[in-house]
Amino acid sequence: MKGLFYKLPSNFLACFAGMNLVWHMIAIGLTYVLVTSGFDWTYYQIFHHGLIFTLMFPGALLGFFFPIIVPVFFLFEGRHKPKAWNAGLATAQAAFLGWLISAIYKAFTGRMHPEVFVQSMTDISHGFRFGFFRGGIFWGWPSSHTAVAFALTICLLVLYPEPRKVKFVALLVAIYIGLAVSISIHWFSDFAAGAIIGSVAGVVVGKAFTKRNLSMNK
């Protein structure tokens, strides 16, 4: 299982290098716009109740299991298939990096989360407690559910550019998880930033493990 840590430190640093750093800035800028424009609060008021909330909420639970099921599936399939084994290691690392980066951001931003099972009448969508560990790393900005789901999914898309049906289904699952948490335990901007940051991690890890797979087949 040492392949799980393949280029882990350099992959982490690569998530903040060059154009990837620009994407982080885009995630931050987009969050600022969504928060200050009132979009987060309006979105919460519209969707945080009723049938849509009921249908989407299971996606938040799926977000806990998705990063476990996918790597385990590929590792099981990869017992006699090196490419699948490589994909299992890659998706596990991508999920970890997606979680780690989002946890680091959360530790310093301390964003207040929306009320989950009741609809709040007070706008707390602007509530950030900047500092260190003022809001923990479970709640807050960006959404780790979304970052992990997109990191894992984009990593798979890099490793397996075909078939298209698999790509479509994988993206739908990631989007479902992200949208589910955006109307339950997170604000919409948490989802948007998580999708961007997670995608960056997925591309970095996917490219690294694609090279690893090629080197193993030489």
Image (cartoon, rainbow, N blue to C red):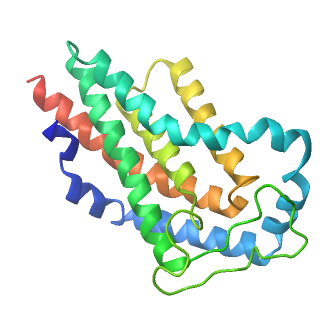
Extreme residue in the bottom direction: 131
Check the image and name the residue furthest to the front: 117
Residue 203 seen in render: no
Q: Quadrant of residue 211?
A: top left
Q: Is residue 202 left or right of residue 5?
A: right
Q: Is residue 42 left or right of residue 1?
A: right
Quadrant in which the N terminus appears: top left
Residue at the spot x=86%, y=67% of the render? Answer: 120
Is 44 situated above or below 56? below
- Name the residue located 63 percent from the left edge and 32 percent from the top edge: 172
Query: Whole-percent x and y of residue 72?
Result: 35, 27
Residue occupying image coordinates x 64% and y 47%? 178
From the viewer's perspective, is 50 left or right of 14?
right
Query: Which percent across, then down, holds residue 95?
Result: 40, 45
Asked where in the image residue 113 lies, by quadrant, the reply is bottom right
Q: Is residue 85 visible?
A: yes
- Please tell me which residue is depicted at 52% across the width and 55% down the height of the picture: 144
When the figure is inspected, residue 115 is found, relative to residue 95, above or below; the finding is: below
How many numbered marks does the figure carry? 0
Quadrant (top left, top right, bottom left, bottom right) of the C terminus = top left
